[in-house]
Image (cartoon, helix red, strand yellow):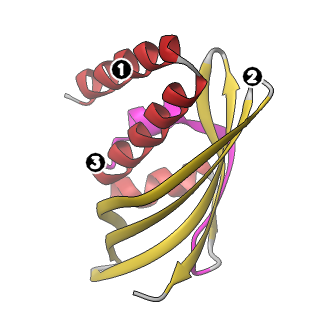
Amino acid sequence: MTRRIFTTAAAVAGAALAAGPDAALKEAEMAWAEATKKADAAALGQLLAHDLTYTHSTGVTDTKKQYIDNLVSGAAKYEAIDYEEMTMRTYGKDTAVLNAQVKLVTVNKGTRGNAHLKFTHVWIRKGGRWRLAAHQSTRLPN
């Protein structure tokens, strides 16, 4: 099932790439959100850069392996990632910065909570695919 979900996400992302860089980037972002909610290690393995720096709103910073391991083990769980706003800027054809405001429902070490965040994602294109290289988030008042 994980393979099929990823194949579907890859097909959608490929169609978006043909539509233009903004569409492809948005598809990659949505694929990240879906893979994160589903704790889909295979999809995240393809979407995240090997040298990912993922800094949570708490200040804790994860590597790619730590981020995926925390999701797969259930230590961290994202039940909802609801986008309120999103802007994208591309720099050349292989670098993009995406800013978003989201509301999350999370379960962290067994404790369910809500978070209202602004975050910045730095995306790089390698091998014809967008990959998330950096995440930095800031907590907003709920």
Q: Quadrant of residue 76?
A: bottom left
Q: Label 3: how many residues lie within 10 Å, few (<14), some (14-19) or many (20+)?
A: some
Left or right: where 14 falls relative to 90: left
> Viewer-proximal residue, 138 or 99?
99
Counting from the top left corner in percent of width and height, residue 54 is at: 62, 59
Q: Residue at x 26, y 28 (%)?
A: 5
Marks 1 and 3 sit apart, C-alpha to C-alpha, by 17 Å
Q: Which residue is mark 1?
A: 12
> Viewer-proximal residue, 17 or 130?
17
> Viewer-proximal residue, 83 or 78?
83
Q: Label 2: how many residues lie within 10 Å, few (<14), some (14-19) or many (20+)?
A: few
What label sits on residue 38 in the rendered view? 3
| Rendered position, 102 above or below 66 | below
Counting from the top left corner in percent of width and height, residue 70 is at: 43, 61
Q: Quadrant of residue 115?
A: bottom left
Magenta stretch: give its range.
Answer: 39-58
Counting from the top left corner in percent of width and height, residue 41 is at: 40, 40
Element type where label 1 sits in the image? helix
Label 3 is placed on what type of residue? Lys
Q: Which circle's residue, 1 or 3, is located before the other in the chain?
A: 1
Q: Is 66 a magenta residue?
A: no
Point out the image quarter for the C terminus: bottom left
Q: Residue at x 45, y 14 (%)?
A: 14
Marks 2 and 3 sit apart, C-alpha to C-alpha, by 30 Å
Q: Most extreme residue toward the right, as rendered?
A: 92
Q: Which residue is mark 2?
A: 93
Q: Nearer the viewer, mark 2 or mark 3?
A: 2
Q: Quadrant of residue 112?
A: bottom left
| Rendered position, 104 above or below 85 | below
Can I make out residue 52 in this image? yes
Q: Residue at x 54, y 80 (%)?
A: 139
Element type where label 3 sits in the image? helix
